[in-house]
Amino acid sequence: MTIPVNQLSDPAVRAFVRALNANDAEAFQQALAPGATMSDDGSDRDLAAWTEKEVFSSRGHMEIESEKSDGRDLVARFRNDTWGEMRTRWRFTVEDGKIARFETGQA
């Protein structure tokens, strides 16, 4: 069973997932705090390059399986045209209603 995006607890995380799933780069940028950072499987990555490759040019999509920590810790099935589908974990740091950092990796 999945959690609908509009039912995610944290508004900043909800905006992030909604923009990612809509493949809307502009809305995605608006969900991020200035200078936002990210890591993938424990290694810091260039956020713009990573999201272009893993999300926007490869049609990334998240289906949320569970949330913890007031909606800032998700387990999701993430899929894109490059890697197919995998079970992933996403941890978000929110500052002033925007995503300041996210960490993702296989769950």
Image (tube, grey):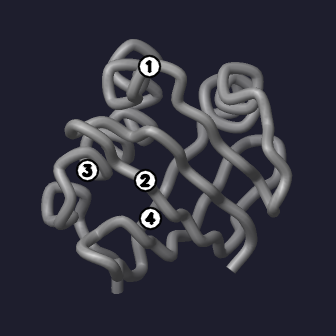
**Measured Cα–Cα span from mark 3 to mark 2:** 13 Å
Determine whether, in the image, residue 58 is placed left or right of residue 96: right
Question: Who's the residue at 39% across and 27% down the image?
Answer: 33
How far apart marks 4 and 1 lie (CA) works out to 26 Å
Q: Residue at label 2?
A: 93
* Numbered badge on residue 63: 4
Residue 102 percent coordinates (x, y):
55, 50
Q: Is residue 3 left or right of residue 56?
A: left
Seen in the picture, residue 63 relative to 53 is either above or below; the reply is below
Q: Which residue is mark 3?
A: 14
Quarter in which the N terminus is drawn: bottom left
Q: Amino acid at mark 3?
A: Arg
* Image height of 34 relative to 63, above or below: above
Residue 9, percent across and down? 17, 66
Q: To which quarter of the image does residue 5 belong?
A: bottom left
Where residue 57 sits: x, y (%)?
A: 69, 23
Mark 4 or mark 3, which is nearer the start of the sequence?
Answer: 3
Identify which residue, 11 or 62, lies in the foreground.
Answer: 11
Q: Is residue 7 above or below residue 65?
A: above
Q: x%, y% of residue 95?
A: 31, 42
Which residue, given by chain and number where applicable, does mark 1 sit on?
34
- Of discs 4 and 1, which sits in the foreground? 1
**Regarding mark 1 in the picture, which secondary structure is present there?**
strand
Q: Residue at x 45, y 39 (%)?
A: 100
**For residue 15, side relative to residue 55 (left or right):** left
Q: Residue 58 versus residue 101: which sits nearer the camera?
A: 101
Q: Amino acid at mark 4?
A: Glu
Image marks 4 and 1: residues in contact by CB distance under 8 Å: no
Q: Secondary structure at mark 3?
A: helix
Characterize the local packing of mark 1: few (<14), some (14-19) or many (20 or more) Cα atoms within 10 angstroms: few
